[in-house]
Image (cartoon, rainbow, N blue to C red):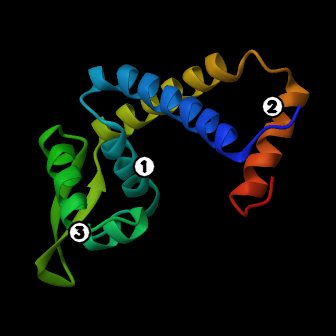
């Protein structure tokens, strides 16, 4: 049976939407959305950094990063301090509350992934991981 590329693409998008929707539903009680959790992960790994650097890491425009940062600061997940190298600029750093929330996001992502991909055996999951890596241009 031949599987046409458009049908494969549609099925891939359906699974991706399911993964995003369920992850968003479960992280919402933390006071985060998916964009904020992604920004929080970058700040945790690369911070402290300027909002413009965050936007660059995320591959988004500065205005979108500003919106995500505003929510993270208001929620107490990120601390915004003056950059000692340039008093006109700010640096973003993860707060203790942000670290706790990020750990919970990681737990939720693992849980959702296990539920979604749990119907696959270990060999099928390894094959899927290798195929997705190949499609994305990375190594498995």
Question: Dot 2 corresponds to which residue?
Answer: 125
- Asked if the residue at tag 1 contacts the one at tag 2, i.e. Cβ–Cβ closer than 8 Å, the answer is no
Q: Is residue 95 above or below residue 111?
A: below
Badge 3: how crowded within 10 Å, few (<14), some, or many (20+)? some
Residue that numbered label 1 is attached to: 41
Q: In this view, does 131 lie above or below 65?
A: above
Q: Percent from the top left, x then y, of residue 82?
A: 14, 70
Q: What element carries label 2?
A: helix
**Residue in the image at 40% along x and 66% along y:** 59
Name the residue carrying label 3.
62
Q: Which of marks 3 and 2 is nearer the N terminus?
A: 3
At label 2, counting other C-alpha atoms closer than 10 Å, the crowd grade (few under 14, some 14-19, many 20 or more) is some
Image coordinates of residue 130 in percent, x first then y, are 82, 47
2 vs 1, front mark: 2
Q: Where is residue 110 in the image (x, y as percent from the top left)?
A: 59, 27
- Secondary structure, mark 3, is helix
Q: Distance between the residues labelled 3 and 2?
A: 37 Å
Left or right: residue 45 compared with residue 66: right
């Amino acid at each position: 049976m031949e599987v046409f590329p458009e049908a494969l693409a549609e099925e891939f998008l359906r699974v991706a939407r399911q993964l995003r929707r369920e992850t968003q539903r479960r992280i919402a009680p933390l006071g985060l959305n998916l964009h904020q959790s992604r920004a929080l992960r970058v700040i945790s790994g690369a911070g402290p950094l300027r909002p413009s650097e965050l936007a660059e890491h995320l591959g988004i425009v500065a205005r979108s990063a500003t919106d995500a940062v505003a929510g993270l600061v208001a929620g107490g997940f990120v601390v915004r301090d003056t950059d000692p190298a340039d008093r006109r600029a700010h640096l973003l750093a993860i707060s203790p509350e942000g670290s706790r929330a990020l750990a919970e996001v990681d737990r939720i992502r693992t849980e959702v992934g296990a539920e979604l991909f749990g119907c696959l055996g270990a060999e099928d999951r390894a094959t899927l991981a290798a195929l997705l890596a190949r499609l994305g241009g990375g190594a498995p």
